[in-house]
Structure formats: C-alpha cells, structure tokens
Image (cartoon, rainbow, N blue to C red):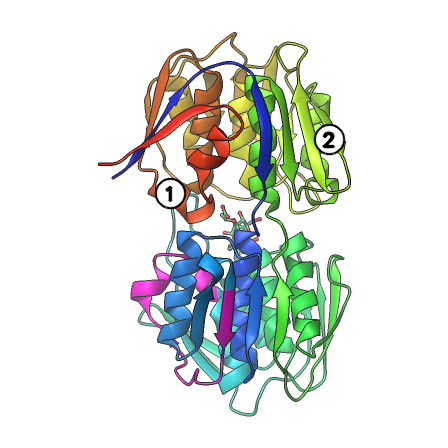
C-alpha cells in the first residue's frame, strides 16, 4: 500500500485547479438509469469512487464510456435491464445506494444491497426507505438487500424527512421525476450537489422546483431524455486546499472556487484570521500575519459548516492560538484523525461528539495512518506545517476523493511525494 511523505516547510504560493465534485458526480451518474437516451457528464473528477460507480452501473446493464482522459463520461441507461445492485460492489462505496430510486422509477422494482457501516458510522437507510414508500414503493429488507417494488408504478406524494439526508433527498428526487403526479419533499437537503442534480434532471426533461431550499417540488413526467451536464466544482476539495495556506502560511489561488460553495466554512476561516477573497473565477486565500486564532466549530447540514471539512479544520486548529471546541453532529464516529494528530504533538481531547483542541506552537512530523477519506487529507495538511517528516500510510483512502493530490500540493510549493510500495 502506497504512502505519502511530506516534509514540513515554509509558506505556500501558487494555484490549484478545483476538480468536479465527487459527491455531485456520484448522484449524477445513476440518473442515466432514468432515460433511454445518452447522458454526457463533463468536468468529471478522476477518482476511484467514480470508477466504482462505473462498475456498478455497468453491472446493471448501463453503458459508461470514459472519454478525454476521464474528464468526460458518456452514459446510457438504454440496456440497463438488471435491477440488482450486488453486495460485492455496494459494500465498497455507500453512494452505490443512489441507484435505488432510479431503478425503482425505471423498472418498478430494485434489489440493492445495504451498504453496511463504514468507518465514520452505521449509516442506515431508513430515511431513504421512508421517502420511497411515500411514493408508493413497497420495500423490505431480506438477506442484506433492500427489495423494493412498485408494481403499479410510483405515484407523487408528500415526504417529510426527519433529517435532511443528502442521499435520501437525491434518491427520492430522482424517483419522483417519473412518478405519476406531484411530489413535495419537506426538510430536503440543501447541499449544492442537490441543486446540481436538479439542474441535470431538468436538462433531461424533469420538472423540479425549490432545489437548494428545504422544500422541493417534483412534477412527474412520462419519460426523460438525454442531456449534457457539467459537474459542479468540488466544495470539499476547495475547502481542503483553502486550509493549506491557512496552516502553512502564504497565499494560494483556487481556480473554480466560489464563496457560495463554502459560505459557513469561509466565515470560520475569516474568524480564525485567514483572508479569503472571491475574484469571480477563483478564491484567493492567504495567511501572512502569524498563527491563526482558535475558533469553535459545529458541523451542520448545508448551509452550515460541512462535516466533510471537520477533520481538515481540526488540523488547522491544532496550531491555533488558544482552545477550540469542535462538535460533530452529523456522524457518530468522525474523530478518528484525532489520535493520529496527537502522534504529531497535537493536544486534543475527545468526549463523544465533541473534541477540544488546545493549540500548540508547532506540530512534529511522524508516521501516521489514514482511517477514512477526509481524515487522510487532514494528516497531509498537518504535515505541511509540522517540523520534519510525516509519512501518511493507507493513502488508498485519499485516491477515493482527491484527484492528483501530490501534484496539486507540489504545485503550491509543498514538499510532498508518493512512496510506492
Ligand atoms: C453524503 O452522504 C456525502 N456522500 C457524505 O460525504 C457527506 O458526509 C454526507 O452526505 C453529509 O453531508 C455523498 O454525497 C456520496 P446523509 P450521505 O444521508 O448521503 C444519517 C465524503 O466524505 N442517516 O446526509 O450518506 C447518517 O447515518 C462523504 O465525501 C440516517 O440515519 O449522508 C448520517 O449520520 C462521507 N438514515 C447522517 O444521516 C438515512 O436513511 C448524514 O447522512 C440516511 C442517513
């Protein structure tokens, strides 16, 4: 298994091109199952999760061609006549569950393996099930698979989510596009990826309003047609690279970044003493006036502080002046990066969903282990500012969600290399 070596060093300077959003692409790809005609996605990130979704869609009979060195995907749901999403693929990536709604809408039936837990939490699907049952689906759990059926087709309904689940909003929105009648989703997720999916579905002929707000209305249509859609920029990659100059000092320009993608996160950076400027086509981030200030962070659904940036923010706060309190309210076990940061000299106390970080002057490089996608990159960020060498092992986690991470960090002056083993 490869690892990444970082030599802590001085201030950073340069530009990073922000790629298309992994979490948008993972819900846009299954949308091809809703139409017979081709769906073309551009600005596609080159990530192992995209490869996994490609494998899953092909197993369902869909066609997926990767063009222009992986930047473009040409998909077709034309031959997608297999309604079974197998455990062997689904267990690798929870987002596989996003084929459930489209399969149900297309075939009137689906069997999707429960994804099983992952490092950060149990991650059940009860909200997905509640939403699809409100559209007339009959769903039962058997042998680890969710067996869903809508023999008389799906009908529009009123859905009120107990929690603004991103995946459940995406599954129900996709299923509702072909249901008979109107569906209203209350307490819908408001993440930018939801709006990006709605934009793509509208281009395919769907009738959707209210995406980005807490109430989404979908008027079912008989069929959808093909479309071409550019994947939105990845706000989590954006936030991650914004933290590089924040933790190591210097100035970095993030091409494709926009404040509207990272609202609450950018406000927290500003509160900590980091300058963020929106140039209209990029974000310029700089920290040149000494250590950042401690800040308190509570993760929330969008537009609150994103849980997917909590680990990275913690890395910054380990070297802040003062004591910061981080509250993780979305997942039940998302502090696995804390003990690794402690190995680098950080002072962190974890009590349930709360981590208290007492800033230190400087971290010390050490061998550390990546435990999940976002934790892995928080260790790289810590290594940028640490004294000496940091080696992050199990970097396959990184390859799931960060494209060309060594090239991008090297491009802004980090001393970083990938050690093949
Ligand atoms: C999406 O996961 C993202 N993944 C996650 O990003 C992200 O952390 C999460 O949204 C929250 O923003 C993709 O978009 C592919 P949820 P999702 O349903 O849809 C509980 C990354 O690093 N829940 O909003 O699975 C669940 O257990 C990944 O890129 C239920 O209880 O998130 C969790 O505690 C990690 N029942 C919380 O809600 C359900 O039916 C958030 O889940 C569904 C969810």
| Bounds of the magenta segment | 73-97
**Which residue corresponds to the image point at 54% horizontal and 59% vertical from the top-left?**
25
Examine the rendered structure and indicate whether residue 389 appears above or below residue 15: above
* Res 255 → quadrant: top right
Query: Where does residue 356 sit, x and y in percent of width and height?
Result: 54, 21
Q: CA distance from mark 1 to mark 2?
A: 28 Å
Q: Is residue 184 magenta?
A: no
Query: Where does residue 74 sit, x and y in percent of width and height?
Result: 50, 71
Examine the rendered structure and indicate whether residue 368 appears above or below residue 84: above
Residue 28 visible in image: yes
* Res 399 → quadrant: top left
The answer to whether the residues at label 1 and label 2 have Cβ atoms under 8 Å apart is no
Q: Is residue 89 magenta?
A: yes
The answer to which of 360 and 196 lies nearer the viewer is 196
The answer to which of 101 and 10 lies nearer the viewer is 10
| Quadrant of the rendering where the C terminus is positioned | top left
What residue would you read off at disc 2?
267
Give the mark, 1 or 2, whose residue is nearer the N terminus: 2
Query: Where does residue 187 sit, x and y in percent of width and height?
Result: 70, 58
What residue would you read off at disc 1?
397
Query: Where does residue 97 sit, x and y in percent of width and height?
Result: 46, 65
Residue pushed farthest front?
68
Using residue 46 as the reference point, say whether residue 158 is left or right of it.
right
**Which residue corresponds to the image point at 46% horizontal and 46% vertical from the top-left?**
401
| Quadrant of the rendering where the N terminus is positioned | top left
Secondary structure beneath dot 1 equals helix
């Amino acid at each position: 298994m490869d690892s990444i070596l970082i030599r802590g060093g001085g201030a950073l300077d340069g530009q990073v091109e922000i790629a298309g959003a992994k979490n948008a692409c993972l819900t846009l790809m299954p949308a091809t199952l809703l139409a017979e005609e081709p769906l073309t996605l551009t600005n596609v990130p080159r990530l192992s999760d995209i490869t996994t979704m490609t494998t899953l869609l092909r197993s369902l009979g869909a066609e997926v061609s990767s063009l222009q060195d992986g930047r473009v995907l040409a998909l077709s749901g034309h031959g997608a006549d297999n309604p079974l999403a197998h455990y062997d693929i689904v267990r690798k990536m929870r987002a596989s569950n996003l084929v459930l709604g489209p399969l149900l809408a297309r075939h009137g039936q689906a069997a999707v393996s429960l994804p099983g837990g992952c490092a950060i939490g149990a991650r059940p699907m009860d909200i997905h099930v509640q939403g699809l049952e409100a559209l007339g689906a009959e769903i039962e759990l058997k042998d680890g698979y969710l067996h869903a059926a809508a023999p008389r087709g799906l009908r529009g309904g009123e859905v009120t989510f107990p929690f603004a689940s991103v995946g459940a909003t995406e599954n129900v929105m996709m299923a509702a596009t072909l249901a008979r009648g109107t569906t209203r989703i209350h307490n819908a997720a408001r993440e930018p990826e939801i709006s990006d999916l709605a934009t793509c579905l509208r281009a395919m002929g769907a009738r959707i309003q209210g995406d980005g707000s807490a109430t989404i209305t979908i008027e079912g249509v008989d069929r959808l047609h093909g479309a071409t859609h550019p994947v939105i920029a990845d706000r989590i990659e954006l936030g991650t690279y914004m933290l590089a100059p924040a933790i190591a000092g210097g100035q970095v320009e993030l091409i494709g970044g926009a404040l509207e993608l990272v609202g609450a996160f950018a406000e927290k950076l500003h509160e900590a003493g980091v300058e963020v400027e929106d140039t209209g086509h990029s974000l310029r981030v700089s920290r040149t006036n000494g250590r950042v200030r401690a800040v308190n962070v509570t993760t929330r659904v969008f537009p609150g502080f994103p849980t997917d940036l909590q680990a990275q923010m913690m890395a910054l706060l380990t070297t802040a002046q003062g004591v910061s309190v981080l509250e993780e309210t979305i997942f039940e076990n998302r502090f696995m990066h804390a003990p690794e940061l402690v190995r680098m000299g950080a002072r962190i106390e974890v009590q349930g969903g709360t981590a208290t970080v007492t800033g230190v002057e400087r971290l010390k490089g050490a061998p550390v282990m990546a435990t999940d996608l976002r934790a892995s990159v928080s260790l790289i960020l810590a290594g940028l500012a640490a004294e000496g060498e940091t080696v992050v092992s199990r970097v396959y986690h990184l390859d799931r969600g960060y494209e060309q991470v060594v090239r991008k960090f090297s491009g802004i002056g980090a001393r970083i290399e990938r050690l093949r083993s």
